Image (cartoon, helix red, strand yellow):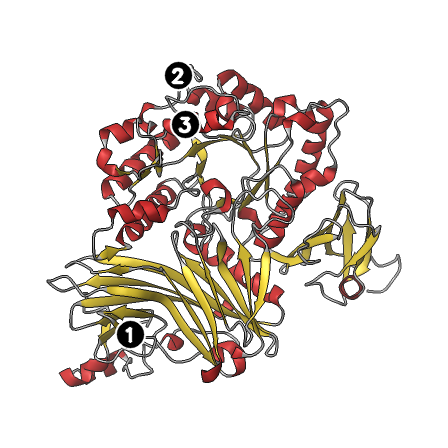
Amino acid sequence: MNSARFVLGRCARARGIVPLLLAWGCCQTAAGGDELNSLWRANTLHPLRQAASPGIGFSLVYDGKPLGPAPLAGWQVETAADGMETRFRHPSGLTVLRQARAFPESAAIAYTLRLRNDGRVDLPALAAVHAMDLSFEGDLANGSSVVWCGGGGADAKFPPNDFAVTRIVLSPSKDSLTLGAAGGMPSRVRLPFFFVENEARAAGLFVAVGWTGQWQATIRAERGANRLRLQAGIPGIDLRLRPGEEISGPQVLVGCYDGPLGNGTNALRRLIRDRYAPSVGGQRLVAPILYTTWFDIGAELDERLGRVLVDRAAEMGQEIFLVDAGWYKGTPSRPYGDMAATWEAISGSLGNWEEGEDPTRFPSGLRRLAEYVRTKGMHFGLWFEPERCGPQSLLAREHPDWVTYIPGRKWGLVDFGNPAVQDYFCKVFDRYIRDLGIRFVRWDMNHHDQSLLSYWAVRDAPGRRGITQIRHVEGLHRVEDYIRRNHHEVILESCAGGGNRIDLATLQRRHVIWISDQKTDPQITRFHLEGLNQFIPGAGQGVALALAPEAVRQPGFALPDITSQCCFGGAFGLRGRLHEWPPAVRQSVRRNVEVYKTLRRFLSEDFYLLAPQAGTLETWAGWQFHDPRTGEGFVQAFRVRSPRPSTRLSLHGLEPAASYQFTDPYTGQGFEVSGGAATVEGLKFELPPMSSRVWTYRKALPAAPKAGAVK
């Protein structure tokens, strides 16, 4: 330990080091630097922040004894001069490092744990490690509710379970709620983001968990103690640390907001945008407009078809051309309509990364295709799935110890907990990014239908349950961090079968999330965006316009604008057989893409859902994206099958006394209305079925004085 960096805590009195403590100005007591409350700062008073109980913010079971969240008796506590880094040392050699970051402007604090064995022998078992264990005193057990969101997937029915927002009231009959991941994928069932709202106090909490694996959170109203308790961690951990061994835990973010849920939504979105989301070349992410070759193409892609698709994608305003799964050596051509054969083809050759592209389908090489993409004014992107491996691939044959198999399951899991694997993939990404001039990487992970927990358990030795998962997640982040550090201009996407890997740690490293593999119903896409935008910024939510090939081939096929416009709340791209789309369809899509380009700058600003996330298509829908700094934004209404020909949508964030100019971005026509009227009376929308209307707005300029008027 660097002695200049830390101040000794409570046990220092027994060692006669009080003068040193006073010199640092950080004398620790039971309410000292080990207390999380002393670090949780806010620029304004918040009732829930004031209600936070004293404690260290975490708990665990060590050698069968529960410890925390009360201060740890008998432990040595050492705190850095700024208070943000604290070490808790047990006489056995266990050290818990808590690293915190305060966000006073958001009344929020983030912290993470690292646990280390500084002794000479194996430690007793660690279990039930709750990286977050916080309590809030008072009448919060009454009137509190939890707002959470479903995770990703490919639910094709309406309304889908994916990204459906749910509110659960904590009542005497249901005084606790447990949320969590499934199969080691952090957002497979539920997002690791949620709100706890107390209507009586007109205030709430937002919580985010950063763990790209299996997580669990419990929100409990402890009515006997008149207390609300929040816990989160990695379930199932039961391991003994070896001498010198260190493990990391989840990152936790918790903050306060006043007023309605929309205020909490935007507090969380802003914090992710400003403090977590990675930049691209030093600039904030602009929603990428991307064409992907997977859907309806897949392993049919070859050099000739690729050039045709490049031409069509450029014609329709795409900015990135992504060559998706199946480009690597050993992948035979298969018709996309035969998905079983296609999946077998693209999966069996996973692991042939060192052999490059398949020469039978790309005889001139991917470099030539990438160069052609750039001549059309687009960037080149490429798909990878590093964590899944075919048993006959080059990687599996040359490094069998790197791959974990489970009886009855064909594909192996590459062990990212192995430093050699991490080094290997750092070099793989380095090579392709540099050789092909890649500017977009889609990192997929398709073990979502086969639990990662089962693979990890194979490598866990007795008394070491959970160590393989921890090492895999750490290794994953090491490679992600390498790409970010060495390739600043590259956009890194998390795909994971569509929306199964969304968590705070991923959002800190990857610019974009491919939110769902369900792309055939635009109303489901809109539903997804209505839900997910209540938790994370829209600029990083990858979606795509979907046109079924059999529909496009029908004589007289026409594309309603609403099909494209349902994608305006995310990073709007295209997929499919663009070369088969009729000219009128391509023209319609291009026009909508050009309008979208004028709107996308608002996607990371404040979001307001103007009508409830509907469980039916018989109701109107609407959303608003608003920049509070400039007073600009856009509002959008949708009518699918509602019997009502008109509706009014009340806007948010406008100054009541100011006038606003509303403009139709398609026609340039518009009107002017006061912020008060747009908020109280709402904007009236009249639309035919299966249509949408977009209005951009900004503060109206003051009228010019008449000639001869005195200023």
Residue matched to label 3: 436
- Is residue 97 in sight in this rendering? yes
Tell me which amino acid carries mark 2: Pro
Q: Quadrant of the C terminus?
A: bottom right
- Distance from disc 1 to disc 2, alpha carbons, whole Å, reads 59 Å
Q: Residues within 10 Å of mark 2 (few under 14, many from 20)?
A: some
For residue 386, above or below residue 674: above
Disc 3 to disc 2: CB gap under 8 Å:
no
Disc 1 or 2, which lies upstream in sequence? 1
Where residue 683 appears, x then y in whole percent? 79, 57
Disc 3 or 2, which lies upstream in sequence? 2
Where residue 334 appears, x then y in whole percent? 48, 21
* Image disc number at residue 67: 1
- Distance from disc 3 to disc 1, alpha carbons, whole Å, reads 53 Å
Disc 3 or 1, which lies upstream in sequence? 1
Disc 1 versus disc 2: nearer the observer: 1
Residue matched to label 2: 359
